[in-house]
Image (cartoon, helix red, strand yellow):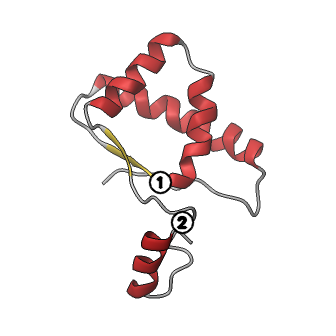
Amino acid sequence: MPHTQLPSGGAYSFEETYNTHSAKLFTSLFTVLDAYPGRTFTLTPSALIHFQKWFASQTFGMRQKVRNSFNLGYVEVVGGSLGDIEGTCTNYQEVIRNIIMGT
């Protein structure tokens, strides 16, 4: 399943991460999804703040491509918690607790 995990915090600031990773990733992603219908991509909740900034800077035409990709189910946001679970949860019960409680 194609997906991305953007660096969050730590070594890079939000702007550094956005400028070096996120903007290029989202531009490439939606260009490919438009060219090859049926392919899918998964976003994690932590990528949404980067996505929001990228989306706001796009042309009307690109925004329509993005909306179409979401409406057709080519892009999906999974998770729902406030943090990334795979790096912080040490066992399956903690993953479930994180999803239910969002901590």
Q: Residues within 10 Å of mark 2 (few under 14, many from 20)?
A: many
Q: Measuring 51% from the left and 81% from the top, which residue is drawn there?
A: 89
Q: Are marks 2 and 1 in contact (CB under 8 Å)?
A: yes
The numbered mark, 2 or 1, whose residue comes first in the sequence reads: 1
Residue to which mark 2 is pinned: 84
Number of marks drawn: 2
Left or right of 18 in this view: 78: left
Quadrant of the rendering where the C terminus is positioned: bottom right
Q: Looking at this view, name the residue that lies furthest to the top.
A: 60
Q: Name the foreground residue: 25 vs 60.
A: 60
Quadrant of the rendering where the N terminus is positioned: bottom left
Left or right of 17 in this view: 79: left
Residue 10 pos. (x, y %): 75, 64
Q: Is residue 94 above or below residue 57?
A: below
Q: Would you identify the image quadrant in which residue 99 lies?
A: bottom left
Q: Measuring 46% from the left and 84% from the top, which residue is drawn there?
A: 94
Residue 36 pos. (x, y %): 26, 28
Three-letter residue code for mark 1: Thr
Q: Would you identify the image quadrant in which residue 12 lies?
A: bottom right
Residue 84 pos. (x, y %): 54, 66
Q: Is residue 34 above or below residue 14?
A: above
Left or right of 69 in this view: 48: right
Q: Name the foreground residue: 60 vs 2.
A: 60
Residue to which mark 1 is pinned: 44
Q: Secondary structure at mark 2?
A: loop
Q: Which mark is residue 97?
A: none
Q: Measuring 47% from the left and 52% from the top, which residue is drawn there?
A: 4
Left or right of 88 in this view: 36: left
Three-letter residue code for mark 2: Asp
